[in-house]
Amino acid sequence: MPIKTALTSLLDIEHPILLAPMAGVSGGALASAVTNAGGLGIVGGGYGDKDWLGRELLNAGNTRVGVGFITWSLRKNPALLDLALAHHPKAMFLSFGDIDQFAAPIKRAKIPLIAQIQTLAQARKAVADGADVIVAQGSEAGGHGGGRSTLPLVPAVVDAVGHKVPVVAAGGIADGRGLAAALMLGAAGVVCGSLFYASRESLTHPNNKRAAFEACGDDTIRSSAIDVARGIDWPGQWNIRTLKNPAIVQWDRDLAGLKSQVETEKPRYLKAAADGDTSVAAVIVGEAVDLIKAEQNAAEIVASMVADATKRLTAAPQMLG
């Protein structure tokens, strides 16, 4: 049974489930699979690798998918937005920075603009700047994020801007229970990252998938260590949640020392990431990793999530006896 919300109507999708645009993970095959399953798949444009983005948009085939960018990074190479818009994406998803510079060309292309935020002030500004959808991301999420938790942030954002645009919940949502809960908080849908990080179609290294299956949320850490190790200059208000490993724990205790050794540690980190060495390279998942136990097709993930949420929402009135 489809779950109809303001999000499904706006984006013309069957299910209120969006794939997080995970850099290097959410490629064309995964985005296409999520869209074909009734959600919206979004290719993760990440830090602006033009060749990678062009290849993955082609890998999406004829399926209309969205494209996501890290906003502060896109400002350094705004021509990438033209590349994305030339593929007529179903939506644009901007995270981590003001969207004002990019809203006008996206609007001219008549593409829905999704803005991910981590505070009420960011939500209000994004709506004022032209966002059609707001994603309220809690700190439970894998990858980069802010400091507020999903459960209180989502209804606060709904109260602040939900009368103008649909609000979507992100962070710690990896099954039908999470989808149903988000809808009860007033959200019009969910964004899922960790859930699809370990999917069959993702570009995640097999070793990283295995590590995710064996992990729980207690094994995660929020830190700036891997950004320093990779030589990526992230703005200070955001850090990243990953699984702990020996290198990250060591680096997190001495970020100043790590910064002084970046010339040595960056090649080491990049080689580990390519080799799937999870003792050094990060497995970028969030606290919902407890709920991810086996590799599945994206279509199976979407169908299971919707079926479970529908079952729970249908049963909810029985609690009012």
Image (cartoon, rainbow, N blue to C red):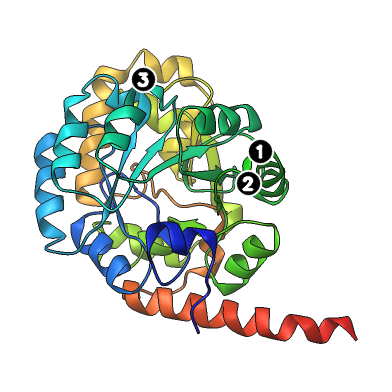
Q: Amino acid at mark 1?
A: Arg
User: Furthest-right residue in view?
Assistant: 321
Disc 3 element: loop
Residue at mark 1 to residue at mark 2: CA–CA distance: 18 Å
Asked if one can make out residue 189 in the rendered structure from this viewpoint, the answer is no
Q: Earlier in the sequence, mark 1 or mark 2?
A: 1
Quadrant of the snapshot with the C terminus: bottom right
The spot of residue 186 in percent (x, y) is 67, 57
Q: Say whether residue 1 is left or right of residue 14.
A: right
Q: Amino acid at mark 3?
A: Asp
Q: Which residue is mark 1?
A: 148
Q: Which residue is mark 3?
A: 233
Tell me which corner region of the image, top left, top right, bottom left or bottom right, holds residue 106.
top left
Asked if one can make out residue 308 in the rendered structure from this viewpoint, the answer is yes
> Is the residue marked by circle 1 packed among few (<14), some (14-19), or many (20+) residues within 10 Å?
some
Q: Amino acid at mark 2?
A: Gly
Q: Which residue is mark 2?
A: 162
| Tag of residue 22 | none
Tell me which corner region of the image, top left, top right, bottom left or bottom right, holds residue 38.
bottom left
Q: Earlier in the sequence, mark 1 or mark 3?
A: 1
Q: Residue at x 45, y 45 (%)?
A: 245
